Amino acid sequence: MKPDQIITCDKELLGGTPVFKGTRVPLQSLIDRLKAGDSLEDFLDGFPSVSREQACVFLALAQESLLRSCLKTKYGPSPFLTGTGVAYNERRE
């Protein structure tokens, strides 16, 4: 699933806040609930318009983005980061 299949930002919907596509549930709601110690199940029970697939794909995208950012900052671009599931298409020049 691609990011645009699970995330939408529209000025007409919550002022452009990123939400799960097809819902009015901000992505930040999932992050806040997990930070507070709630489980994914708790979040999904509280926001039934968000599918498990949407939530899991969002978390995977967030993880990948974080790994890319951290590893790129620490080690610079890499052709492939073994074991992370993160591949780079960038080249060091």
Image (cartoon, rainbow, N blue to C red):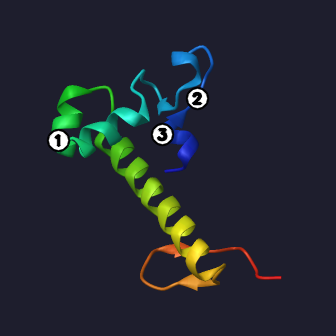
Which mark sits nearer the N-terminus, 1 or 3? 3
Residue sticking out furthest to the front: 74
Q: Position of residue 54 (x, y in %)?
A: 38, 42
**Which picture quadrant has residue 32?**
top left
Q: Earlier in the sequence, mark 2 or mark 1?
A: 2
Question: Eyeballing the image, is 2 above or below 69?
Answer: above
What residue lies at 26% left-to-right and 27% top-to-bottom?
47
- What amino acid does circle 3 point to? Ile
Vertical arrangement, residue 18 with respect to residue 23, above or below: below
Q: Amino acid at mark 2?
A: Cys
Q: CA distance from mark 1 to mark 3?
A: 21 Å
Residue furthest to the top in view is 12
Decide if residue 40 is on the left or right side of residue 7.
left
Of tags 2 and 1, the one toward the viewer is 1
Residue identified by numbered label 3: 6
Q: Which residue is mark 2?
A: 9
Q: Residue, x 51% and y 37% (percent of image)?
A: 7
Q: Amino acid at mark 1?
A: Asp
SS for tag 1? loop
Count all numbered tags in the image, as a single digit.
3
Q: Is residue 14 left or right of residue 11?
A: left
In the image, is residue 75 above or below residue 53? below
Contact? badges 2 and 1 (CB < 8 Å)? no
Q: Which residue is mark 1?
A: 38
Q: CA distance from mark 2 to mark 3?
A: 11 Å
The CA distance from mark 2 to mark 1 is: 25 Å
From the viewer's perspective, is 71 left or right of 78? left
